[in-house]
């Protein structure tokens, strides 16, 4: 049984392709800088070679994966894992989705007319996709390499970086900085 947690945007097939593609990249990241064969991907993912080949070809089209020039039966990443985010994976999966048949598109177009509801739903879908992309962009594949070694990256806190000593004192320029002294109150 598929639960809500097992789906991205309520689409189980999309989730499965997204998860499988991420598994492929995870295997490549954990083996980096060594290349990975189809057999190694089959062992790591438990998926058949035919499905993996289709997903790898989608990754090649997305410029995330390439054949090893020295061993054409092996795969390698095209860039550093930190440069690839889950947004890239998601876009790759969306681009590799089978297209709807033209007859299905034509019949649904004739059945409904352009309306304010269509426009509203389209705007909502665009906003949802932008939000999904924004959140997926925050997760780069180098997290897989780090978590495989048992180490986790330090959390980034932009305010802490700006104020390393947790002090909120401001430096003043000019003469004002040389006249910093405690105030004296006459008795």
Image (cartoon, helix red, strand yellow):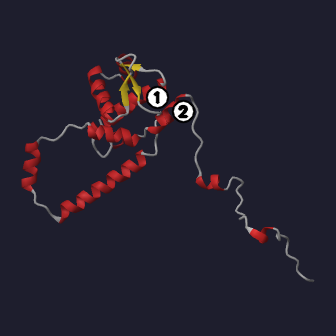
x, y (%) of residue 11?
27, 42
How crowded pointer 2 is (Cα within 10 Å; few <14, some 14-19, many 20+) is rated as some
Viewer-proximal residue among 128 and 174: 174
Q: Residue at x 61, y 56 (%)?
A: 159
The answer to whether 162 appears left or right of 97 in the picture is right
Q: Considering the numbered disc 1 on the image, is that residue within a helix, a strand or a loop? A: helix
Q: Nearer the viewer, mark 2 or mark 1?
A: 1
Mark sitting on residue 146: 2
Q: Judge whether 142 appears above or below 115 on screen.
A: above
Mark sitting on residue 119: none
x, y (%) of residue 24?
38, 28
x, y (%) of residue 132?
37, 49
Q: Which residue is mark 1?
A: 29
Viewer-proximal residue among 147 and 137: 137
- Which quarter of the rendered picture does the C terminus lie within? bottom right
x, y (%) of residue 184?
88, 77
The answer to whether 185 appears left or right of 165 in the picture is right
- Which quarter of the rendered picture does the N terminus lie within? top left
Question: Between disc 2 and disc 1, whose residue precedes?
Answer: 1
Kindly give the residue lying farthest to the front in the view shown.
Answer: 174
Kindly give the residue lying farthest to the right in the view shown.
Answer: 187
Q: Residue at x 10, y 43 (%)?
A: 102
The answer to whether 26 appears left or right of 129 in the picture is right
Q: Picture quarter containing residue 112? A: bottom left
């Amino acid at each position: 049984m598929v639960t809500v947690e097992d789906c991205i945007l309520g689409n189980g097939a999309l989730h499965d392709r997204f998860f499988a593609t991420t598994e492929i990249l995870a295997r490549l990241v954990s083996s980096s800088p060594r290349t990975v064969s189809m057999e190694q991907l089959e062992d790591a993912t438990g998926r058949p070679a035919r499905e993996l080949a289709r997903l790898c070809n989608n990754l090649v089209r997305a410029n995330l994966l390439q054949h090893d020039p020295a061993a054409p039966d092996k795969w390698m990443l095209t860039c550093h894992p930190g440069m690839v985010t889950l947004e890239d994976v998601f876009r790759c999966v969306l681009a590799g989705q089978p297209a709807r048949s033209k007859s299905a598109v034509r019949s649904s177009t004739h059945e409904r007319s352009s309306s304010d509801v269509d426009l509203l739903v389209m705007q909502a879908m665009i906003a949802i996709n932008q939000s999904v992309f924004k959140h997926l962009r925050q997760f780069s594949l180098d997290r897989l390499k780090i978590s495989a070694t048992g180490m986790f990256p330090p959390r980034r806190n932009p305010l802490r970086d700006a104020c390393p000593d947790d002090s909120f004192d401001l430096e003043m320029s000019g003469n004002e900085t040389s006249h910093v002294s405690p105030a004296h109150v006459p008795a």
